[in-house]
Image: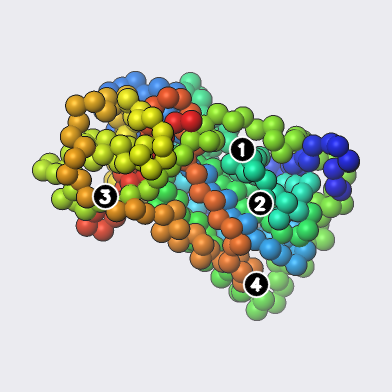
Amino acid sequence: MAAAAGAKPQVHIESVQTGLPTRVVEPDRTRLIAVSAPPLPESALQRRLRAMLYYRADGAAWEEGIWVKESLGEALCFFPEMAGRLRRRADGSWEVKLNDAGVRFQQATVEASLDEFLADKDLPRKEAALAPWVDVSAEDPDMCSLLFMQLNRFQDGGYAVGVSCTALLADPRSLARFLMEWARIHAEMKEKNKTVLRPMMQYMAYFQRPEVCCRRIRSFPIDSASADGVHARTVLFRASASAAGAGADLRALTAACMDRASEELGADRASRFTLVVAPADPARGATTVETSVAAGGLKTTGHKLEAAEWSDLGLEELTLRGAKPVHVSCRIVAGGEEGFVVVMPDGDGFLVTATMPN
């Protein structure tokens, strides 16, 4: 139902579920998050990636939710870290416990058409209502999901998939790989369903459609989400391994990226930044984190930086229900006054995201 005249459009949460891997994870598997100078501040746990994918549809998007949860569970078998939980180590570093705790999956309806929502001038803030996040507790991290996915249905039948994920769990490239694999499994499962004797869709009658649901879990205005960190701006670069200099001085490379980002954005240079270095193999390697790195004194000249784009991640090709997204939005949400940089091995070089504070 549309919002009353003068009333703020609402987001209605229709269901909250847990997406679980369909197979048991091998016991005692972990992935290290090495902290250069512990302790890791709690604010570092909240810096996150947000991906939004918007699609036009023929009005049957409500049924997609069942398929999303099923295919998500299958995809998590190949990316068990996504269903894991953070755990503090005795030495002050952290680790991701690879288990079957699962990811948070929600379905929601939005009191707006797809085009109206995309045309909103405050889109970065309002997208937070479509890709929810609950802060990770430093005291009880094992109780906190590290990845959230929400399927949002608009009034005109369009829909959006919103994903939020802590940057300690996945860098932009690994999150994109996970989403692309999920979409592939999603399409494969739906295609196989057409050929089985008793297809899954025969059970749809047991699930209530969102438009006739009489009990909503909660509702809130689209613009009520916290603005902290959502207006931080990110610039992407590529650099060859030689650009990092002898010994792969990634701090100097990072400072150079921050300088270049501040020039392109017309923003003041952050005096300090947090550096996250992603592993070449997310399933086995360690992520390293260094907070409050002083930018002063680091050599920022002599680095060959090439411009990169969010579209390089390939999410514009993520096909659902036979269609590619009409719009893709990627963002790093980072509050506070420090810059935030993620360095990802990429072939013979690096892909770097440099995020400037608000």
Is 122 on the left-hand or right-hand side of 332? right
* Residue 304, position as x, y percentages in the image: 22, 50
Query: How far, Cα to Cα, is label 3 from label 4?
Result: 47 Å
- Residue 118's disc is 2
* Residue 290, position as x, y percentages in the image: 30, 30
Q: Identify the amino acid type marked 4.
A: Asn
Q: Identify the amino acid type marked 2.
A: Leu
| Label 4 or label 2, whichever comes before in sequence order | 2
Please name whichever residue, 221 or 185, is drawn nearer the observer in this view of the structure: 221
| Label 2 or label 1, whichever comes before in sequence order | 2
- Residue 193's disc is 4
| Label 3 or label 1, whichever comes before in sequence order | 1
Q: Nearer the viewer, mark 3 or mark 1?
A: 3
Q: Nearer the viewer, mark 4 or mark 2?
A: 2
* Residue 263, position as x, y percentages in the image: 35, 39
Q: Quadrant of residue 124?
A: top right
Q: Identify the amino acid type marked 1.
A: Arg
Res 313 visible: no
| Label 3 or label 4, whichever comes before in sequence order | 4
Report which residue position mark 1 lands on: 125
Q: Nearer the viewer, mark 3 or mark 4?
A: 3
- Mark 2: few/some/many CA within 10 Å (<14, 14-19, 20+): some
Query: How far, Cα to Cα, is label 4 from label 2?
Result: 33 Å
**Could you say whether the residue bearing mark 4 is in a helix, strand or loop?**
helix
- Mark 4: few/some/many CA within 10 Å (<14, 14-19, 20+): some
Report which residue position mark 3 lands on: 305
